[in-house]
Amino acid sequence: MTLNFSELKARVSHKEHLTINDVVDILSSGPGAKFALVELAAQQRTEFFGREITIANLLGAAPLSDIPQVVVTVADAEDDQTLARKLMDAAEELESLTHGQSGQLVLDFLPVHKVSDAAQALSPMRAVGVLIALRLLIGSHSLFLRQQRVQRLQSLQSLGLHVIDTLMLEQNQENASLSVFEDFVSIRNARLEISGVQGRDIVEEYISFFESQGDSDARSYAEVLLGDQESSGGGCGGNCGCGSGGCG
């Protein structure tokens, strides 16, 4: 199948349901088409969630609201038809649970493993395609990318952040503070704002938290990654989306 972007965009704007051929086309489309599809998916995300993003494991965060959830796992070595059917089944299950109310689709990418056929590997661009397909399938429902975000999206994280509305901060066991502040940078670069941090200096909170855990490098990481950004207004300028007025 060949992706007809104009036709797909028109049907999405009219809230028509995607077909399995649409999902296959999204998954199999080339990089150029996926960039255009990210914009389409981002419009859907912004329509329902604005520029805010929820961090499920943020310090002091309240538990996620008790709404219907469907969990879908995606791994390597799944062909387009199989993967498309899995995504559609998850979206249809969520719709059947919610009856027109709000729900959440939770996506877990499974850890990377080697496959004999490189074409079957879940590349970062293919992972972006999964996110695009899910956003267009579920519309106003929340899309929570829970597991393996950094590992699967790699340098394409900013594209993924334009599509999802909820995530988990990465906390690499060897260097948790660095991974958290790198996530704040990704959120800033995507021009998103973290939900629920208004009036908080969340960067300073994380620095204090990590220092209490014996991480003497936390402040340095924050200052290097989120500090002196002249092009963003100086300091962190409050532009990392973390709600801080500056991490210095």
Image: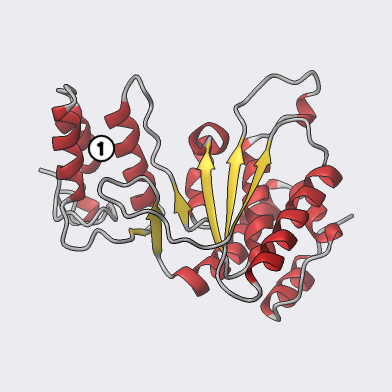
Q: Residue 69's quadrant in the figure?
A: bottom right
Question: Is 103 located above or below residue 116 in the figure?
Answer: below
| 197 is higher (above) or lower (below) than 212 | below
Q: Nearer the viewer, residue 114 or 90?
A: 90
Q: Amino acid at mark 1?
A: Leu
Determine whether, in the image, residue 2 is placed left or right of residue 197: right
Is residue 127 in sight in this rendering?
Answer: yes
Please name the residue that numbered disc 1 is placed on: 225
Q: Quadrant of the N terminus?
A: bottom right
Number of numbered callouts drawn? 1
The furthest residue to the right: 1
- Residue 181 in the image: above or below residue 237: above
In this rendering, would 99 be left or right of 210? right
Percent position (x, y) of residue 186? 39, 45
Residue shown at 55% from the left, 70% from the top: 102
Extreme-bottom residue of the structure: 14
What is the quadrant of residue 132 in the picture?
bottom right
> Who's the residue at 16% across and 21% down the image?
214
SS class of the residue under badge 1? helix
Q: Position of residue 232 (x, y in %)?
A: 24, 55
Asked if residue 87 is positioned above or below residue 9 in the image, the reply reads above
Q: Where does the C terminus fall, quadrant-wise?
A: top left
Q: Quadrant of residue 193?
A: bottom left
Residue 104 picture location, percent across and down: 56, 59
Which residue corresponds to the image point at 73% horizontal and 47% vertical from the top-left?
30
- The structure residue drawn at horizontal position 86% and vertical position 58%, both measured from the top left corner, is 21
Q: Residue 225 at x, y = what percent? A: 25, 37
Horizontal side, residue 132 vs residue 27: left or right: left
Residue at the far left: name it. 248
